Amino acid sequence: MLTLKINGESRQFSAPLTVAGLIEQLGYAGKRIAVERNGEIVPKSQHANTELASGDQLEIVVAVGGG
């Protein structure tokens, strides 16, 4: 089990898990988002290759259009 802190809330997931897998599980697939892992932005091109570890702290921000 992975324990991740996402936007300040602790949640548990099955291991292994990548950033891309997490995005899919959280229902953000296809949305314009930014992901920060332990204080560093994870480029979208690296989402599928970035393995998450228990204790990681993530901030996920959804882009909102408007004017």
Image (cartoon, rainbow, N blue to C red):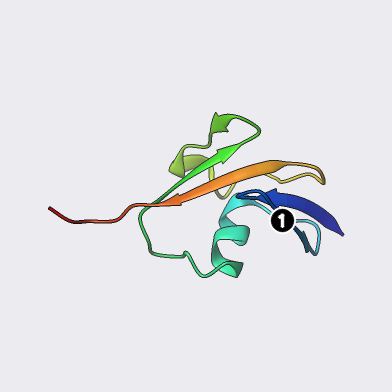
Residue at image point 80% right, 42% down = 55
Label 1, secondary structure: give it: loop
Q: Residue lying at the far right in this picture: please name it.
A: 1
Q: Is residue 18 visible?
A: yes
Residue drawn at (45%, 44%), measured in percent from left and top? 44
Q: Residue furthest left?
A: 67
Residue beneath the point at 47% across and 37% down? 43
Is residue 33 found left or right of 37 in the rendered image? left
Q: Please give left or right for residue 26 compared with residue 11 in the image.
A: left
Instruction: In this rendered view, identify the residue nearer to me: 15 or 9.
Output: 9
Residue 30 image point, x, y percent: 39, 64
Q: Can I make out residue 50 in this image?
A: no
Q: How many numbered marks are there? A: 1
- Quarter holding the N terminus is bottom right
Amino acid of disc 1: Leu
Where does the image place residue 12, in percent across and percent down from the top left? 79, 62
Q: Residue at x 45, y 49 (%)?
A: 61
Label 1 environment density (alpha carbons within 10 Å; few <14, some 14–19, many ≥20)? some
Query: Image check: 57 left or right of 65?
Result: right
x and y percentages locating residue 63 in the rendered image: 33, 52
Outermost residue, top direction? Answer: 40
Q: Where is residue 59 drawn, in percent x and y?
A: 56, 44
Asked if 24 appears above or below 37 in the picture, the reply is below
43 left or right, relative to 18: left
Q: Which residue is mark 1?
A: 17
Front residue of this view, candidates 22 and 10: 10
